[in-house]
Image: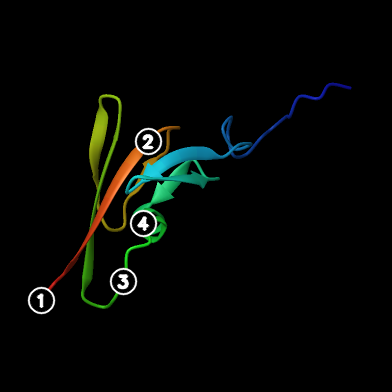
């Protein structure tokens, strides 16, 4: 019998962690798709009822902004910059 996995529901990248950078700090994530909230939580920035996060990301020529409620497909080495502002 072969050691190959058959019918892997998570896709080909489900079996390893992804190495990303969030606000200059290395992080490991298990899921290939990360949400706005999960990246904001990884930033370690303080939260509150009046806190608004802005998240930008880049990997090579791929760059963009992650908006509240959105998600992004992770690549190893992806860099995220998270800023928090108070909506006063």
The answer to whether mark 4 and mark 2 are in CB contact below 8 A is no
Label located before the other in sequence (3 or 1): 3
The answer to whether mark 1 and mark 4 are in CB contact below 8 A is no
- Which corner quadrant holds the N terminus? top right
The answer to whether mark 1 and mark 2 are in CB contact below 8 A is no
Is residue 52 found left or right of 74 in the rendered image?
Answer: left
Q: Nearer the viewer, mark 1 or mark 4?
A: 4
User: x, y (%) of residue 11?
Assistant: 58, 33
Separation of residues labelled 1 and 4 (CA atoms) = 21 Å
Is residue 58 found left or right of 41 in the rendered image?
Answer: left
Query: Mark 3 highlights which residue?
Result: 47
Query: Mark 1 highlights which residue?
Result: 88
Tag 3, which secondary structure? Answer: loop
User: x, y (%) of residue 61?
Assistant: 25, 24
Separation of residues labelled 4 and 2 (CA atoms) = 14 Å
Label located before the other in sequence (1 or 4): 4
- The disc placed on residue 78 is 2
Tell me which residue sits at (51%, 38%) in the image: 18
Is residue 16 found left or right of 23 in the rendered image?
Answer: right
Label located before the other in sequence (1 or 2): 2
Query: Mark 4 highlights which residue?
Result: 43
Label located before the other in sequence (4 or 2): 4
Separation of residues labelled 3 and 1 (CA atoms) = 14 Å
Separation of residues labelled 1 and 2 (CA atoms) = 31 Å
Q: Which residue lies furthest to the left in this view?
A: 88
């Amino acid at each position: 019998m072969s050691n190959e996995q058959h019918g892997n529901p998570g896709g080909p990248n489900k079996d390893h962690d992804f190495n990303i950078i969030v606000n200059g700090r290395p992080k490991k994530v298990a899921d290939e798709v990360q949400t706005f909230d999960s990246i904001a939580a990884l930033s370690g920035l303080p939260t509150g009822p009046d806190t608004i996060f802005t998240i930008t990301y880049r990997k090579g020529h791929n760059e963009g902004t992650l908006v509240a409620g959105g998600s992004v497909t992770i690549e190893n080495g992806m860099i995220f910059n998270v800023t928090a502002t108070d909506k006063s």
